[in-house]
């Protein structure tokens, strides 16, 4: 039994079919939810939260059915929506405490946990100010704090780094990774930023047009495909590429001194350096490309409507 | 010069509140990234560039035209703002058409340009629907379409990739690259630094209303002299590599990576470093798996120059 | 040696039962309502008639006062069903400004920054949410309508001769039923209109309008068409007649046609109004809006 089980889930909104027969089992520690706009990501999240009822099929969270056990599911979920969502008139502490009490904590514990959560996400003195006075970064953090306060088993984050400047973004990603490491919460993160998902998640669900385009475990992907190499060079790049090809590698060069090549087994990085030394070319960057999330995503977009498959 | 955007000692105050203070720069054609924390004055700068606000002091000249000549100014500049509001009740097409008509062109021209812009952002099928029904990404695209529709020579984009899915982001970046090649001035503000890094040539860093750095990314990096460049080398014997580097008296600092399979090396002379690394690799005592400059990009510059004091969180 | 790490830790303590979450909504709703000075002011203002009526009861039962007054031939010190009708009417209508101020405070803050997705992602259903707000509003209003009137009744019983109480228990029952119907209707109206109007002060005005505009229209219909059925839009008239019947007060007979509406018609209208309010709430209290077209 995975964290989220989908069984031919179909959801209709306003007469249209938005989710069309999703079937799959998600069991990762941190699950990334990707897909183009309109693919049904928000609808899927809303269905798991019980805001939409499936027109057929079922969705289960921790074994509980989303149609019948809504209250219990919501008990164990912390939700951080994408858009602004708060009660402006309350102070930060009061808001988080209110939400914690709604999740079932007795008042005294709720206050304790509220302060803990606020400390954990990094909101200091600001917590005593009204939420309507918060900056964008603080509003994101307060949403995260209220999702954590009651100790949920599943944290659903919708575009958690939305609108954050680079420093705040790094901090948010760092916080999320720490939550993941703590081990007691599973994460479901929906985002358009492949980089964020790549850094945080170990399993990815890609939706397209209401169907599953791919469901795979990227941890496993990371351990394969070691012979693709990407170089960034400075100097006589073209000649370098020619010589590399002469060694027997498939090689393609791009503007900016970028070179992508596939190395046959009998060669190694040292050979490239030998050529570079001869040519006076600087190798500024070298990385072994594994099948990155970007490739998985692009491939998924091309294969439309495939059923769930665990790729290796 | 008539092909630059020039700011000379420009300041903007909103009453007592500081927008920007004594900012001067000169932007050539191509793609320039505008980088800074929230509330640093980026939006003020963009509003000044597009003529939406007048400076409290200083001179602004966009391709030789000052914001005083409003007609010519607005025809030349396109602005895709960050804020998500639209006139009510309009469809995507109507919004574009109306914006174009405001430039005083004939019906047919407006129709043609609107269709063209919709084509470019791939919103032709959805153009007949009301904007209120658009998803966030589509609203972003229609704003972009509105900014490019009248073929401006200067394009100012405030967080243009916000809300776009990965493919749309790639498409937009490709579009920006193409526009940059055509000789337009593009000023793009984005928090996702590595994406814009890939296509932009220059960077402007701003924080707290003050200009911190401006110019080509690599040059800016090199000018931050007090921080030597850092390179991460992944290899099988990192300690050996580090000691070799120290033995030729080159590196300033070496730090082993947490997983034991790499070492961060700091060097004051990057070109010499690469040469030495090449030699070490050829020697064959150390097998090099990967080399990555850890801070020759906008993200690193941002951290060094703005860092965590710039953020208001 | 002590370096304390404050990492995230899971919660393993007591969890309150699901139905108790409604209590949380009630508590926070009341706290929100009472945090405004104007609310307190309106509360106190609503209790002014109560004080006057209280004094009236005292005077009515004080022989010295009675002597003083009866010499002038006034009969207004008589404590009977008419007195209680007046009390109920006064208190109930004084509760209206209070409600129109408090109801928006309960709902509009939640809707203004779309807090509903987060609120409803907790184990409280839409019905539970509305019920919690309803109870908070009901309690506030009951404390200025039902409570004072019942206190007056008890006070009177304290003074009254034995047997008065059991003979007039129907009055107390009438107060409870009539007051409850009124408060329920007011609460529903308040919540429904607050959920549809974005700005709080505007919501207050809209609520007043919702009550008095149909009343005005009903009055016009009654006068112009010379029919009693126009009064079905006229809430003040309907409630007066209903309360009269509940408290056993003989109705005034006007010359000419019969102006009294059948009780069933009144109740049906009130029920219809409540159902409209439910429909309004159903449309607005949603975690997600579906935009068509």
Image: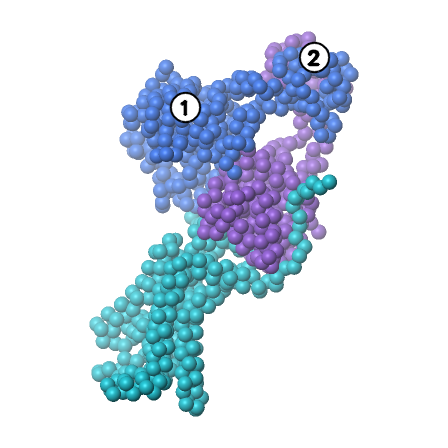
Q: Which chain is blue?
A: B
The picture quadrant where one finds residue C75 is bottom left
Q: Position of residue A151 (x, y in %)?
A: 63, 51
Residue depicted at x 38% and y 17%: B3
Residue A52 visible in the current orientation: no
The correct choice, above or below, for C53 with respect to B135 in the image is below
The correct choice, above or below, for A260 with respect to C190 in the image is above
Residue depicted at x 21% and y 72%: C224
Q: C288 or C150, which lies in front?
A: C150
Q: How is the image coloured?
A: by chain
**Tag 2 subunit:** B
**Tag 1 subunit:** B
The correct choice, above or below, for B246 with respect to A227 in the image is above
Q: Viewed as shown, does residue B129 lie left or right of A118? A: left
Q: Viewed as shown, does residue A267 lie left or right of C258? A: right
Q: Viewed as shown, does residue A130 lie left or right of A200? A: left
The correct choice, above or below, for A33 with respect to A284 in the image is below
Mark 2 lies on a secondary structure that is: loop
Residue B249: give its label: 2
What colour do you see for chain A? purple
What colour do you see for chain C? cyan
Residue furthest right in the image: B285
Residue depicted at x 42% and y 20%: B25
Q: Position of residue B29 (x, y in %)?
A: 43, 19
The residue labelled by disc 1 is B23
Q: Position of residue C163 (x, y in %)?
A: 43, 91
């Amino acid at each position: 039994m995975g964290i989220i089980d989908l069984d031919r889930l179909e959801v209709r909104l306003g007469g249209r079919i938005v989710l069309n027969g999703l079937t799959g089992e998600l069991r990762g520690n941190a699950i990334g939810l990707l897909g183009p706009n309109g693919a049904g990501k928000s609808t899927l999240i809303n269905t798991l939260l019980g805001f939409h009822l499936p027109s057929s099929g079922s969705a289960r969270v921790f074994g509980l059915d989303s149609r019948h056990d809504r209250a219990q599911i919501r008990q164990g979920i912390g939700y951080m929506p994408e858009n602004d969502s708060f009660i402006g008139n309350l102070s930060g502490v009061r808001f988080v405490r209110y939400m914690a009490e709604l999740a079932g904590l007795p008042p005294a514990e709720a206050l304790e946990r509220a302060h803990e959560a606020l400390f954990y996400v990094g909101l200091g003195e600001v917590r005593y100010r009204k939420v309507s006075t918060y900056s964008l970064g603080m509003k994101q953090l307060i949403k995260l704090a209220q999702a954590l306060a009651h100790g949920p088993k599943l944290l659903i984050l919708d575009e958690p780094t939305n609108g954050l400047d680079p420093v705040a973004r790094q901090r948010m990603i760092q916080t999320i990774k720490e939550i993941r490491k703590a081990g007691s919460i599973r994460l479901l993160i929906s985002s358009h930023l492949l980089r964020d998902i790549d850094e945080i998640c170990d399993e990815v669900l890609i939706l397209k047009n209401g169907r599953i385009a791919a469901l795979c475990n990227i941890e496993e992907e990371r351990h394969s495909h070691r012979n693709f190499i990407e170089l960034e060079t400075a100097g006589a790049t073209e000649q370098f590429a020619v010589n590399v090809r002469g060694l027997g590698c498939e090689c393609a060069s791009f503007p900016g001194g970028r070179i992508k090549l596939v190395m046959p087994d009998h060669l190694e990085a040292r050979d490239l350096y030998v050529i570079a030394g001869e040519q006076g070319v600087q190798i500024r960057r070298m990385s072994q490309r594994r099948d990155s999330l970007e490739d998985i995503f692009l491939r998924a977009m091309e294969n439309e409507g495939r059923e769930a498959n665990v790729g290796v | 010069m008539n092909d630059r955007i020039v700011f000379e000692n420009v300041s903007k105050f909103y009453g007592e509140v500081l927008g920007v203070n004594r900012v001067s720069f000169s932007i050539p054609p191509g793609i320039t990234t505008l980088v800074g924390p929230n509330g640093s004055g980026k939006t003020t700068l963009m509003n000044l560039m597009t003529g939406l606000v007048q400076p409290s002091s200083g001179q602004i000249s966009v391709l030789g035209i000052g914001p005083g000549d409003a007609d010519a100014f607005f025809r030349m500049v396109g602005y895709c703002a960050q804020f998500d509001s639209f006139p009510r009740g309009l469809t995507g097409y109507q919004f574009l058409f109306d914006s174009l008509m405001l430039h005083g062109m004939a019906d047919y021209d407006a129709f043609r340009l609107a269709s063209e812009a919709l084509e470019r952002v791939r919103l032709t099928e959805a153009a007949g629907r009301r904007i209120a029904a658009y998803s966030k990404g589509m609203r972003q695209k229609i704003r972009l379409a509105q900014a490019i529709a009248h073929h401006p020579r200067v394009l100012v984009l405030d967080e243009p990739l916000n809300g776009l899915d990965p493919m749309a982001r790639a498409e937009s970046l490709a579009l920006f690259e193409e526009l940059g090649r055509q000789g337009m001035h593009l000023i793009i503000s984005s928090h996702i630094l590595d994406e814009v890094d890939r296509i932009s040539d220059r960077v402007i860093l701003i924080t707290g209303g003050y200009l911190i750095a401006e110019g080509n990314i690599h040059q800016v990096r090199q000018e931050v002299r007090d921080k030597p460049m850092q390179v991460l080398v992944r290899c099988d014997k990192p300690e050996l590599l580090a000691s070799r580097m120290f033995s030729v008296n080159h590196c300033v600092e070496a730090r082993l990576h947490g997983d034991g399979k790499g070492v961060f090396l700091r060097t004051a002379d990057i070109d010499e470093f690469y040469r030495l690394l090449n030699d070490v690799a050829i020697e064959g005592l150390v097998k090099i798996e990967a080399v990555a400059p850890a801070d020759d990009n906008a993200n690193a510059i941002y951290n060094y120059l703005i860092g965590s004091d710039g953020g208001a969180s | 040696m002590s370096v304390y790490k404050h990492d995230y830790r899971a919660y393993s303590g007591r969890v309150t039962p699901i139905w108790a979450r409604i209590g949380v909504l009630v508590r926070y709703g009341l706290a929100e309502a009472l945090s405004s000075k104007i609310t307190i002011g309106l509360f106190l203002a609503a209790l002014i008639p109560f004080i006057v009526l209280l004094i009236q009861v005292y005077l009515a039962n004080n022989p010295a006062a009675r002597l003083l007054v009866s010499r002038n031939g006034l009969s207004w010190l008589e404590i009977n069903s008419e007195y209680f009708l007046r009390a109920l009417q006064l208190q109930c209508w004084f509760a209206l400004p209070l409600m129109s101020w408090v109801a928006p405070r309960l709902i509009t803050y939640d809707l203004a920054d779309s807090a509903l997705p987060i609120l409803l992602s907790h184990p409280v259903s839409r019905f539970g949410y509305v019920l919690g707000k309803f109870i908070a509003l009901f309690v506030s209003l009951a404390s200025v309508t039902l409570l004072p009137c019942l206190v007056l009744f008890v006070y009177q019983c304290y003074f009254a001769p034995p047997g008065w109480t059991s003979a007039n228990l129907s009055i107390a029952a009438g107060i409870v039923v009539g007051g409850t119907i009124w408060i329920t209707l007011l609460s529903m109206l308040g919540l429904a209109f607050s959920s549809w109007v974005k700005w709080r002060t505007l919501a207050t005005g809209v609520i007043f309008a919702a009550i008095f505009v149909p009343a005005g229209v009903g009055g016009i219909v009654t006068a112009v068409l010379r029919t009693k059925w126009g009064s079905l839009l006229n809430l003040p008239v309907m409630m007066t007649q209903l309360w009269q019947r509940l408290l056993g007060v003989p109705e005034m007979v006007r010359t000419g046609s019969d102006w009294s509406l059948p009780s069933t018609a009144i109740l049906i209208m009130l029920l219809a109004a409540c159902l409209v309010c439910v429909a309004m709430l159903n449309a607005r209290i949603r975690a997600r809006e579906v935009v068509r077209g």
